[in-house]
Amino acid sequence: MTSVLCPVLAPCSLLATVFLMPRCPWATTEPNITYHDQEWGVPVHDDRKLFEFLILEGAQAGLSWTTILKKRENYRKAFHGFRAEKIARYGARDVKRLLGDTGIVRNRLKIAATIQNANAFLVVRKEFGSFDAYLWSFVGGKPKQNRWRKMSQVPARTTESDAMSRDLGKRGFKFVGSTICYALMQATGMVNDHLVSCPRHSKLGGRRRRR
């Protein structure tokens, strides 16, 4: 009897763990669940990955993050794996190709901003040694551990994101408003904004919730 029931019960137990875990309330369906559990808030120090998030957060402007996550692989293909050196050399033919690509957000301003941001990214990387060193300087080089108990407490912007936005703007970056910068900080682990009730909060360095 046991040998028959185990194969059935094990997957059910796994599914229960996946869907009943007290996650942050925005992660209720895919691809948000996997993104929340594996990426959101994990410190990123790879320059190409940071550039990818910068572009994707900018692409999200006026849209939902779920929409962008669903298009993420298409973005990687369309923009040569987010290799800034390649994107910085895009010309009129590339813009036309991207405007005809249904797998991405076909917005001329956002596409132009991606090319401009690639050029600005290369300048910053040359000046600071890495894009990582530059971005993380706005939080002192280590994640800020917040202790929010409900989503209404989580800010849309902070003094750090304001400073990042201003400096990026001065350096020629586009689609880098303070709210976009804060979303970037959340995504790349510069701040831990998982709610204290979410298991990911403590796993990413936050103090365990007091009972």
Image: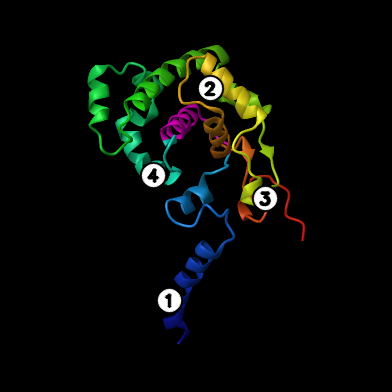
Among the 4 quarters of the image, the one containing residue 87: top left
Among the 4 quarters of the image, the one containing residue 85: top left
Provide the residue designation for mark 3: 202
Q: Name the residue type under label 2.
A: Phe
Q: Which quadrant would the C terminus be assigned to in this image?
A: bottom right
Structural distance between the alpha carbons of marks 3 and 2: 27 Å
Q: Look at the numbered discs 3 and 4 and tell me whether their residues touch, using CB distance below 8 Å.
A: no
Structural distance between the alpha carbons of marks 4 and 1: 34 Å
Q: Which numbered disc flags the more N-terminal residue, 3 or 2?
A: 2
Q: Look at the numbered discs 4 and 1 and tell me whether their residues touch, using CB distance below 8 Å.
A: no
Provide the residue designation for mark 1: 8
Q: Name the residue type under label 4.
A: Thr
Mark sitting on residue 183: none
Q: What element carries label 2?
A: helix
Q: Look at the numbered discs 4 and 2 and tell me whether their residues touch, using CB distance below 8 Å.
A: no
Provide the residue designation for mark 4: 67
Left or right of 22 in this view: 3: left
Provide the residue designation for mark 2: 131
Residue at (47% x, 66% y) in the render? 15
Q: Which quadrant would the N terminus be assigned to in this image?
A: bottom left
Q: Look at the numbered discs 1 and 3 and tell me whether their residues touch, using CB distance below 8 Å.
A: no
Look at the image and give the residue range highlighted in magenta: 43-59
Q: Which numbered disc flags the more N-terminal residue, 4 or 2?
A: 4
Q: Name the residue type under label 3.
A: Ser
Total marks shown come to 4
Q: Which numbered disc flags the more N-terminal residue, 4 or 1?
A: 1
